[in-house]
Amino acid sequence: MSSSTKAGEFVFEQKDAEAKGSALYSEHIKLTDKSHIAAFAGFLMPLWYTSISSEHRAVREAAGLFDCSHMGVLEAAGPYAKEFLNIVFTNDLNKLSDGRAQYGYIIDAAGNVLDDIIIYRRAEDKYMVVVNATNEPKIKAYFFALLNDEVVIDADNPDRRLENKPVVRDMRNIKSGSDCRVDLALQGPAAIDIVIELIEDEQVKGQIKELKGFRFFETIVTGIDCIVSRTGYTGAAMGFELYVHPDKACELWSRLLEKGKPFGLVPCGLGARDSLRIEAGFPLYGHELAGPFDISPFQAGYGFAVKLDKEFFIGKAAMQKEAEQYNMEVVRIELPGAKGIRPVRGSDAVLEGGGKCVGWVLSCAKVDDMQIALALVSRDVIKEGETIGVYYLARNEGQVRKGRKQEIKKGEKAEADINGVTLNRFAKF
Amino acid sequence: MVVKELAYTKEHEWVKIEGDEAIIGITDYAQQMLGEITYVELPEVGKETGAGDELAVVESSKAASDVFAPLSGKVGEVNSELEEKPELVNSDCYKKGWICRIALKDKQGVEKLMDSKQYEEYLKGL
């Protein structure tokens, strides 16, 4: 199922299994029509409950609750957990103390980005590793291949192997131990008030209020053992991820919705999760990271999470090269998006002022009467505040017959169908 | 929701025959699947279309979906209100959200369309 080439490429063939209901499926079908539920990364997940735009707005103005139980949650534990993860991970765990989390990448020795992840340090010898749902089977296979010495970790020294190994387990699997976790995300300005409502202990309430970004602690929320983390994927300045035992997920979900209702809390589907992260400028693996354009962390705007001053990590040599020579970058663009304007889509061409193609759209979302797109363009060609054009690629055969192109190459000239302006790379709300 | 008096295609278009004309739209099932519709590319008035040809494009923030001509003929009137208010396809797909009229060449193909009962059965099987 997986293999590692001499050059250090980790090859993984994913088996397609039939999608199963997420840990919260029984709640979803109470809240929305089945036609709004679709298979994603092997789980049946809600795309939206009422509409993407109303759920998006709720997160910006009040709060939204997301089923993120599809996200992979792994644990590396034991005296060698930190050493192992610091070799696998591009950021630097030596800078992490208990109760703090760090964002970074898993890269194979050939330089391929396998995933972007968050590592939570629960104790010196206990780490929770949260990986993308779509990549979870691959990362699990990669970790176990590493533990079995089946992976080339250094392309310049293919015989190099890990000296010490941790104990790795899947924290979503209730057979793996009593401490199991799945992720629910509570995001938006009212999130703090809702969590406070569900906590009895005055001291803990104070701790929650003081909690800064990328920090977490373990406590009891409405009688349920939780890891409460100030992290999220929506760009909301206020938001939590609550990691809970899968058997308690439905209970926590329904209590949050009930207590949160007076604060304007609504359940949110994958559609709003996508439009919110696009508006914030966050990459999605397969779109703004890796994917058809093979986008590196440097191109995505996250060079800071690749610590080239670390003595060693898998893929370091490839990342050093990439840091010196990358020539494309991800930018965030705002375009008109009122009803009646054709939506911009992935692969549409991005044009500089003179009409020359400098790159392509990766993702786009409608936000109120605007569209926010993330695009991959030539580095240092488009500056913040500059006008850019977008050419819509043909969406069907009829449009091709009318002369609309199906592909625009870099450097090729085209006439813009719609004009927008380049924004700052990230936004916080 | 399925309306009794209309005919349906497997691609989720509805058809209302009025004399020598057919009014075309997309069904409630189709608009539900698409989500919030933000743009409708209407066909050109006067265009000759064969059954199964691409007629229009309906786009939501999630997908662009082709609307196929259920019957052959010439595009007559189009619902230009959808240029400004594409959301009518969501809110009233069987009435205000109609897409266009086709002046039928003949009645060929009408018998191949599903009636509301058959379409309901078809939806159950999806």
Image: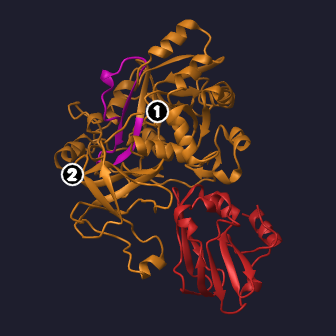
Chain colours: A orange, B red
Residue nearest the observer in this picture, A205 or A141:
A205
Image point 30% across, 69% down: which residue?
A: A415
Residue A31, numbered label: none
Quadrant of the drawing holding the C terminus of chain A: top left
Judge whether residue A115 is colored magenta.
Answer: yes
Toward the bottom, the furthest residue is: B106
Q: Is residue A386 above or below residue A348?
A: above
Q: Is residue B111 magenta?
A: no
Residue B121 % position (x, y): 80, 67
Residue at which label 2 appears: A379
Position of B69 with respect to A311 (left or right) is right
Say left or right for A384 vs A210. Answer: left
* Picture residue at 51% right of the left edge, 80% below the top: B44
Q: Residue at x 65, y 51 (%)?
A: A36
Identify the residue under disc 1.
A232
Label 2 and label 1 in one chain: yes
Q: Looking at the image, can residue B16 be seen? A: yes
As drawn, B85 above or below A214: below
Chain for disc number 1: A
| Chain letter belonging to callout 2 | A
The residue segment tinted magenta is A89-117
